[in-house]
Image: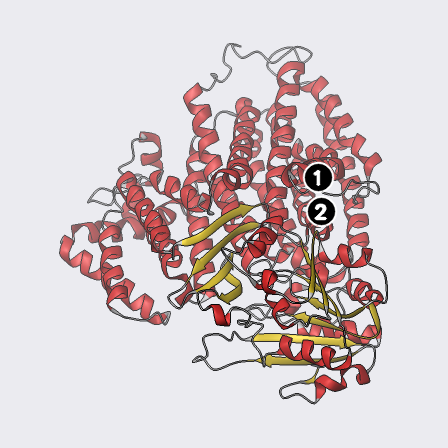
Amino acid sequence: MAPLTVATAALAALLAFLVEPLVGKLLLPTFGGAAAVWTTALVFFQVALLVGYALAHVSIRWLGLRRAAIVELVVVALPLLALPVALPARASPPPESSLAGWLLALLAVMVGAPFVALATATPTLQRWLAATGGPAARAGAVRLFAAANAGSLLGLLAYPLIVEPNLDLVDQARLWGIGYGAFVGLIVVAAAVVLRQGSVTPADPAASEPADEPGAAPAASTRSRLGWVGLAAVPAALVVGITAQLSVDVAAVPLLWVVPLAVYLATFVLAFAAPRPIGLRVADVLLPPLALGVAVSLVGGATLPPWAIFSVDLGALACAGIVCHGRLSLARPEPERLTEYDLAIAAGGALGGLLAGIVAPLLLPVPLEGGIALVVALGLRWGTDPSGAPSGRDPEIGEAVGDAGRRRDLVSRGLSVLHRTPFLLRYAAFATAFIVGLAWLRAPLDAGTVLAALVLGLLLGLARWPVVFAAAVGAVFALSLVAEPPALETVRTFYGERRVIEDAAGRHGLLVGTTFQGIQHYRQVDRRREPIGYYHRGGPLADVVAAVQARVDGATIDLVGLGVGAMAADARPTDRLTFFEIDPAIVAIARDPRLFTYLADATALVDVEVGDGRLGIAAEPPGRADLVVIDAFSSDAVPVHLLTREAIGVYLERLGSHGVIAFNVSNRFVELEPVLAAAARDLGLAGLARIDDPPSSDADADPSHVVVLARTPEDLAGLADRPGWRALVAPAARAWTDRYSDLLGAFHGP
């Protein structure tokens, strides 16, 4: 029974975490590639996991194992009728408001039934295995939780590394359906073993499982249940916050969705793979400096390498997860209470996801949910006394973390030496370490940096008192908000945070995530109509517009991505521009004359349509545009569905016979020119590219990378003669399609 249940639980978890990125990728084009698609999907899957665990707990509790086994077979068999997983053919278009609710409903239709069925597997199999009797079976029921999380981790890593680069979405869905059928077969065999063996519960198998049976495990107290929920909620909220940051800054794609989630699941594995949590002591020690590193990245993130920021964020997530999940592991009840325990963990995950993914964006004007979760995790540490022993309030946990064998624990011995060191010496060591670290990361070592290192060293000296240290880090997070430039406007929507700030030169800038997506000389009225940033005169996008205008008296230009409307500055009175912008908040900002005036000052006829740009262009009459510009970003990430071969086909249909498509592919992490070159090769198109790297002394010009495509080389003749333009990089990879993309192959690192 033990090998069978382990294999079944691992397969169920693997399938559950394969379908998560698969479904997210299916949904992305509908929402313009928004990173919030994945964070909302995370919330859905956490709630669906809760539903599955609740179903398993209630059915076993009320029906007994025999009848519950029959219910389980029905639950896992019914979703076979709904496979393969796909977008509903008659799904209504997303509304402009309540996007998160609409997406949750769509996910329930697409994958709700099979995912809930998979979620019932682990708690049900745990109880079945425990019911077979014997110490080995009872111990195996506990370790089954770790096996399921290992399967989840394998599924997450397999998707971006194996599945996504080699299979299109249709084949992925078909293969997943075959795997689900195999899971149903295994669960049928496991149920047959349980039904055949007579030893299912100490009580009558046909009756409800009594809570007060003599010799049965005592019921958990309300405090214990709330503790389980709280300990599970904190890492769940933290993983949502960190995933949102990575998706916004790099790309909303499975490769970057799974990294934080894989770290999160790995902490479950470490917490439950052995009788005592693995790495708990190390995590307790490393979490304070990593939390301070996260605070540093918030205050001075623009001066630090992105890889350093990501490493610190993921390290803090790992340590916080081990601290919280380690406490959960140490507080686990007897096997008879495992379904209740699993239900509480699932409830905590759903609660954390809902608070961070749904509630926080509605209530908090800036994304603070990750920082709040990290501060709470810091307060849940144990700390140490001067001997290196844990000083937490829970005696059982204290004994587990620093038991009689701690003399052989190098971490504890090192802490003992550290705490016996005079405070001033410890403080000097911490401050020096921060200064050396910042210098190694090439941060400017000015007076402000040195002062910050001195303060951080002092704060680290408080780490032995968890609650005090958590409050101190919370104060640093609060100060990071004060340190930011005052915002003229702050808006947070389903698509992310939008801030308008004014610099010392009187320029207004639109900050989306961590990237400026439009700048204007606002205070200098005589320069308001001058495009700057990516769009500065002499830059690649300005070249493209000028080349088209030289050929056409009155140009029709479609632009995906509004920003602040800077491209309207170069339009002539005879030109017609249509901007497609998915976020109504961006439209409101660009039209507000208190913030930006590019649209108000435009001499051309300018239209703005709200909705996904690809869908908007597809709805326009064919053959009328002279230029299509793809300039849509989510912070620094270009939505993948705007770069596929099918998307380029949509743009070509909109273009006239000599039209041109321009792609702004400027970003820090992904090399997209070869992707477009591969599509041009497959479609038989001509192409050019230009990388603009203006001198740092020119504050009004930002570096940019632009690729242009056209049907024939003659259509690009007016552009090819301009300085800096060259032929596209020869592609070696497969072109991206709506069913296939390989971000890992295009990733060049920070």
Residue positioned 16% across, 50% down in the render: 420
| Residue 8 pos. (x, y %) | 69, 38
Residue 58 showing in the rendered view: yes
Q: Which mark is residue 23?
A: 2
Residue type at mark 1: give it: Leu
**Image check: 133 left or right of 180?**
left
The residue carrying pointer 1 sits among few (fewer than 14), some (14 to 19) or many (20 or more) residues within 10 Å by Cα, namely: many
- Distance between mark 2 and mark 1 Cα atoms: 8 Å
Q: Is residue 245 left or right of residue 545?
A: left
- Seen from the viewer's position, the closer of residues 187 and 638 is 638
Task: Find out whether the residues at labels 2 and 1 contact each other: C-beta distance under 8 Å.
Answer: yes
Is disc 1 placed on a helix, strand or loop?
helix
The residue shown at (63%, 40%) is 100
Q: Earlier in the sequence, mark 2 or mark 1?
A: 2
Which mark is drawn over residue 107?
1
Viewer-proximal residue among 238 and 527: 527
Q: What kind of residue is marked 2?
A: Val
Task: Judge by depth and name the residue closer to the eye, 12 or 189.
Answer: 12
Return the mark for residue 178.
Answer: none
Counting the numbered discs, the total is 2
- If the image is split into quadrants, where does the N terminus sit? top right
Q: Position of residue 304 (x, y in %)?
A: 40, 66
- Residue visible at 71% across and 87% down? 720
